[in-house]
């Protein structure tokens, strides 16, 4: 599974980097992992995913926060 490592970045940079990643990979349909360290992402990443109609599931919150994100899934 592909991993997008955004640890060490403070919000809103993880959202900006995630948006850029999605635009650079328009055909990506497989789930991928987004790893962040900023606790603000616990609200920001799911909100962004909902807005973009992406499926987003929290996988872990310690030591870093990991979300599994996928396009084209029901949210």
Image: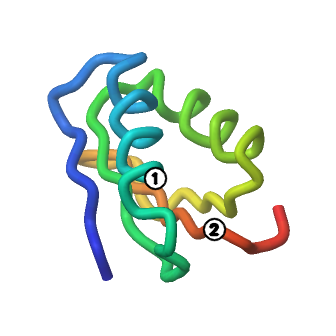
On screen, 35 above or below 27? above
Front-most of residues 67 and 18: 18
C-alpha span from label 2 to label 1: 9 Å
| Count of numbered badges drawn on the protein | 2
Q: Which residue is mark 2?
A: 71
Q: Which residue is mark 1?
A: 22
Horizontal arrangement in the rendering, residue 51 relative to residue 60 (left or right): right
Circle 2 SS class:
loop
The answer to whether marks 2 and 1 mark residues whose Cβ atoms lie closer than 8 Å is yes
Residue furthest right in the image? 74
Looking at the image, which residue is at 84% across and 70% down?
A: 74
Circle 1 SS class:
helix
Looking at the image, which residue is at 50% across and 63% down?
A: 26
Q: Residues within 10 Å of mark 1 (few under 14, many from 20)?
A: few
On screen, 71 above or below 35? below
Q: Residues within 10 Å of mark 2 (few under 14, many from 20)?
A: many
Looking at the image, which residue is at 60% across and 61% down?
A: 57
């Amino acid at each position: 599974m592909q991993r997008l490592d955004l640890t060490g970045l403070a919000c809103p940079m993880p959202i900006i980097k995630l948006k850029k990643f999605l635009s650079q990979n328009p055909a990506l349909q497989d789930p991928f992992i987004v790893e962040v360290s900023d606790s603000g992402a616990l609200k920001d990443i799911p909100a962004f995913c909902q807005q973009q109609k992406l499926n987003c599931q929290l996988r872990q919150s310690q030591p870093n926060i990991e979300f599994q994100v996928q396009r084209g899934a029901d949210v």
